[in-house]
């Protein structure tokens, strides 16, 4: 019974560690991409390198020009 408690505690510890590291990595990526936070919306935005329009960080492509960020 004692080993089961330790396994559950270890699982919870590593699960919480995963979420902390995931958030830190995402914040680092957001900061490296030059993303700015809109004060009114709280949604991170990024400027399109092709047309200069601002759009959501999670958008697959720019809604203004369709740029996907892929080269070629």
Image (cartoon, rainbow, N blue to C red):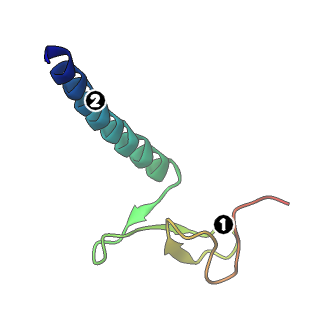
Can you say which quadrant of the picture contains the C terminus? bottom right
Q: Residues within 10 Å of mark 1 (few under 14, many from 20)?
A: few
Question: Is 72 or 52 nearer to us in this picture?
Answer: 72
Q: Residues within 10 Å of mark 2 (few under 14, many from 20)?
A: few
Could you give the CA–CA distance between mark 1 and mark 2, rounded to whole angstroms? 42 Å
**Which numbered tag is attached to residue 49?**
1
| Mark whose residue sits in front, 1 or 2 | 2
Instruction: Report the side of 51 relative to 13 (left or right).
Output: right
Instruction: Report the side of 39 relative to 56 (left or right).
Output: left
| Whole-percent x, y for residue 49 in the image | 66, 66
| Whole-percent x, y for residue 8 in the image | 22, 28
Relative height, residue 14 to residue 25 (above, below) = above
According to the picture, the residue beneath numbered tag 2 turns out to be 11
Label 1 residue SS: loop
| Most distant residue in the bottom direction | 64
Can you say which quadrant of the picture contains the N terminus? top left
**Which numbered tag is attached to residue 3?**
none
| Whole-percent x, y for residue 2 in the image | 13, 15
| Whole-percent x, y for residue 25 in the image | 43, 41
Quarter-wise, where is residue 41 in the image? bottom left
Quarter-wise, where is residue 18 in the image? top left
Label 2 residue SS: helix
Question: Is 28 or 10 nearer to us in this picture?
Answer: 10
Relative height, residue 16 to residue 37 (above, below) = above
* Sequence-first disc among 1 and 2: 2
Q: How many marks?
A: 2
The residue at the point 30 percent across, 29 percent down is 14
The residue at the point 46 percent across, 53 percent down is 30
């Amino acid at each position: 019974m004692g080993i089961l408690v330790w396994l559950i505690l270890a699982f919870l510890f590593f699960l919480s560690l995963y979420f902390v590291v995931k958030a830190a990595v995402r914040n680092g990526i957001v900061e490296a991409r030059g993303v700015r936070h809109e004060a009114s919306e709280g949604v991170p935005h990024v400027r399109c390198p092709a047309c200069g329009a601002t759009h959501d960080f999670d958008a697959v492509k720019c809604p203004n020009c369709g740029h996907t960020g892929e080269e070629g």
